[in-house]
Image: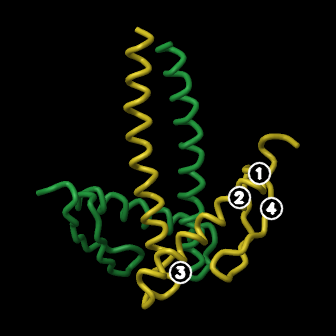
Chain colours: A green, B yellow
């Protein structure tokens, strides 16, 4: 299968079906869906009064926050590696 | 302010108010909220029939997918740095 071909994966997140299209493998998409489902359930257990859309938005906020922190870490590591190579 | 003190930041995402509690700075939280809002609007423009909760779930899927890809990249870089140091 060529790298640019799109996969179509059906997943279940928080009791809803989603068809996800993308170049990622189906196993990667299923892993991502399971992580999102887990996170939504975790946030729900702490804030049981939130509706599904707010729960999902807060899950997205959480994931983007983690992404930015990881990106900072990556940039520091890239600078460190550059220093080692110089 | 001590590092473990929690900040309380009010943000607006996709027309809804959210109060976000966490150890991150308010400016970091506002940046994250703006990124989530942008991503929701981008996904909405491609799939205008999605309701807000599905839109938010797909935004979370997107963010977690990006996070995992970045984590792989970080792990490869850590291994490379270790090799340089050895």
Residue B29 got which mark? 2
Q: Is residue B4 above or below residue B27?
A: above
CA separation, marks 2 and 3? 21 Å
Looking at the image, which residue sits at the far right? B1
For the residues bearing labels 4 and 3, Cβ distance under 8 angstroms: no
Q: Is residue A2 left or right of residue A21?
A: left
Q: Which residue is mark 1?
A: B25
SS label for mark 4: strand
Q: Which residue is mark 4?
A: B8
Query: Residue at position x 58%, y 59% from top?
Result: A62
Determine the chain carrying the residue at label 2: B
Task: Respond whether the residues carrying marks 2 and 3 are from the same subunit.
Answer: no
> Which is more toward the observer, B40 or A42?
B40
SS label for mark 3: helix
The location of residue B60, given as percent across then percent down, is: 48, 66
Query: Residue at position x 66%, y 65% from top?
Result: B33
Q: Residues within 10 Å of mark 3 (few under 14, many from 20)?
A: some
Quadrant in which residue B84 is drawn: top left
Q: Which residue is mark 3?
A: A52
For the residues bearing labels 2 and 1, Cβ distance under 8 angstroms: yes
């Amino acid at each position: 299968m060529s790298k640019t071909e799109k996969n179509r994966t059906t997943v279940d997140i928080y009791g809803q079906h989603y068809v996800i299209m993308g170049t990622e493998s189906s196993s990667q998409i299923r892993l991502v869906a399971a992580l999102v489902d887990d996170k939504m359930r975790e946030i729900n257990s702490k804030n049981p009064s939130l509706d599904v859309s707010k729960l999902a938005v807060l899950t997205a906020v959480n994931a983007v926050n983690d992404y930015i922190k990881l990106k900072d870490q990556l940039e520091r590591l890239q600078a460190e590696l550059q220093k080692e190579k110089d």
